[in-house]
Amino acid sequence: MKKHIAILKGDGIGPEIVDQALLVLNKVAEKFGHEFTYIEVAIGGCSIDKYGVPITEEGMNACKQADSVLLGAVGGPKWDGVDPSIRPEKALLAVRKELGLFANLRPTKLFSQLADASPLKQSIVGNGIDLMIVRELTGGIYFGKRRTESVDGEKVATDEMTYSEHEIERIGRVAFESARKRDKRLASVDKANVLDSSRLWRAVMHRLAEEYPDVEYSDILVDNTAMQLIKNPSQFDVIVTENMFGDILSDEASMLTGSIGMMPSASLSSTTLGMYESIHGSAPDIAGMDLANPIGTIMSAAMMLRYSFDMAEEADAIECAVNAVLDDGYRTADIWKEGMKKVGCKEMGAAVAARL
């Protein structure tokens, strides 16, 4: 196959981790007879420095014309003082909106080799952690109307959380279909005891559940979900929720594995076009020091092969290579312990590519 990929390296450690993912993708192309071509697009702070905006119109068009998008990370303290309308993070919201990336899939899996890296007791993680959070990505409070006004002599800020039936239904279908491919259990997270938007969410999800009788469906309030993820994460298979709840819960879930550097994600549209990225930030404090963990981005590339390119065998090969490297004791600083071989970002990427 021939596939064209937009590469958004971004800021901080973004270029380092993306370079290692490209090393692995090129090895996949060589091994399986594919051809991957790339176009690099500036995004975030580096784009602000060069062009005055977090992503240019030309860059956005390049993303739209690609078969998929691979992202590093954006932002950093350097750009904290820029006008809010052009903050680095604005580019991510713009790309999600322009590409129609409404479904964010974040797998949380504790590698057996790293079980002792989890902050939870071994009696809890011993049952295994392997769950998928499906987050609605283009609606809710992050995209609702907002305003700050003066009322009775003081400032009052308002952010609106809005959801329509079709927005809920389309993310619900992604979640049910994901559950069908896993352990056939789906928990829908809301705050229906307080919010009207959550009551609509629950009503639509109940209607959808009737179409998926093979999936065990349950409702759970967001505050209880936060507790249950710590108390007994193995009870979850697939979790689906709205944008802000998903943002918070997926970051919480990522730390169950011991390092946010291990976690990939996929943002999907109604077509095969998707954007793939590790869920961590730009980590400017270690940028350029060859200390970053590239596994999250490498695993994101595997998700790209699986979801956008229908290359399941190739995705499996990357995941097996990562497992082999961990079995061999290779560890970046964030997951290192005594007795293991501490390596940098480049050596970890090279090790995964070699095992392909």
Image: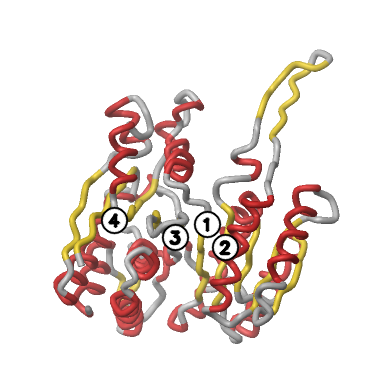
Task: Identify which residue is drawn at 42% across, 57% down.
Answer: 271
- In this figure, which residue is indicated by the disc labeled 2? 134
| Disc on the earlier residue, 1 or 3 | 1
Binning the other alpha carbons within 10 Å of mark 1 as few (below 14), some (14 to 19) or many (20 upward) gives: many
Question: Element at badge 3?
Answer: strand
Question: Element at badge 2?
Answer: strand
Dot 1 amino acid type: Ala
- On the image, the x and y values in percent for residue 321 come to 29, 79
- Which residue reaches farthest front? 211
Binning the other alpha carbons within 10 Å of mark 4 as few (below 14), some (14 to 19) or many (20 upward) gives: many
Given this view, does label 1 or label 3 mark the residue nearer the observer? 1
Q: Is residue 280 left or right of residue 36?
A: right
Task: Identify which residue is drawn at 19% across, 61% down.
Answer: 36
Camera-side residue of 289 and 345: 345
Q: Is residue 224 above or below residue 136?
A: below
Q: Which mark is residue 18?
A: 4
Q: Is residue 328 left or right of residue 87?
A: left
- Which residue reaches farthest top? 153
* Alpha carbon separation for disc pair 1 and 4: 22 Å
Dot 4 amino acid type: Val
Dot 3 amino acid type: Ala
Residue 342 found in image quarter: bottom left
